[in-house]
């Protein structure tokens, strides 16, 4: 059976690999695109959110709100992760 550290390391790799493969020239990835990758791996939303928040707290990823909210679609809003009072729509590696 895998240890907590092994599970976290596996999760970190899934997220960092996805962000690396999806990022654009700015280095940011839309959460909606990351969610598609994670959903395809059948990772449920609660598990995704818990681990993304952990990774953000430990500075393995950066999460931020989209500054131009007018460009956001319903899918973007649904994919956002709530950090404090902000809905974060984009993710990057520090």
Image: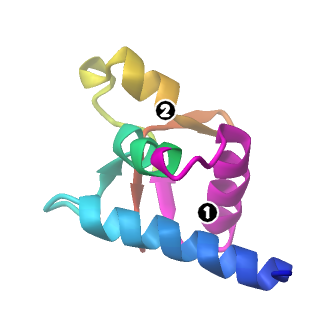
Residue 13 against residue 57 in the figure, above or below:
below
| Residue 6, quarter of picture | bottom right
Residue 41 is inside the magenta segment:
yes
Which residue is at the far left?
25
Left or right of residue 20, residue 55 in this image: right
Q: Give the residue at x 50% y 24%.
A: 78
Which-is-in-front pick, marks 2 and 1? 2
Query: What residue do we see at 65% from left, 39% from top?
Result: 45
Q: Quadrant of the N terminus?
A: bottom right
Q: Nearer the viewer, residue 5 or 30?
A: 5
Q: Residue furthest front?
A: 1
Q: Is residue 1 above or below residue 26?
A: below
Vertical arrangement, residue 31 with respect to residue 60, above or below:
above
Q: Quadrant of the C terminus?
A: bottom left
The residue drawn where x is 18% and y is 58% is 24
- Write down the region rendered in magenta: 40-63
Q: Residues within 10 Å of mark 2 (few under 14, many from 20)?
A: many
Query: What residue is disc 2 on?
Result: 79
Neighbour tally class for label 1: few under 14, some 14-19, many 20 plus, Cα within 10 Å: some
- Residue on which disc 1 sits: 56
**Residue 41 in view, yes or no:** yes
Q: CA distance from mark 2 to mark 1?
A: 16 Å
Left/right of residue 36 with respect to residue 11 in the rendered view: left
Provide the secondary structure element on which disc 1 rests. helix
């Amino acid at each position: 059976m895998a240890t907590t550290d092994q599970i976290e390391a596996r999760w970190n790799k899934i997220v960092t690999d996805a962000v690396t493969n999806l990022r654009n020239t700015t280095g940011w990835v839309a959460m909606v695109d990351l969610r598609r990758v994670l959903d395809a791996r059948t990772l449920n939303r609660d598990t995704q959110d818990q681990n993304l928040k952990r990774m953000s707290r430990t500075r393995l990823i950066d999460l931020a709100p989209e500054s131009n909210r007018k460009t956001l679609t319903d899918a973007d809003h649904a994919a956002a992760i709530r950090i404090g009072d902000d809905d974060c729509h984009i993710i990057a590696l520090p």
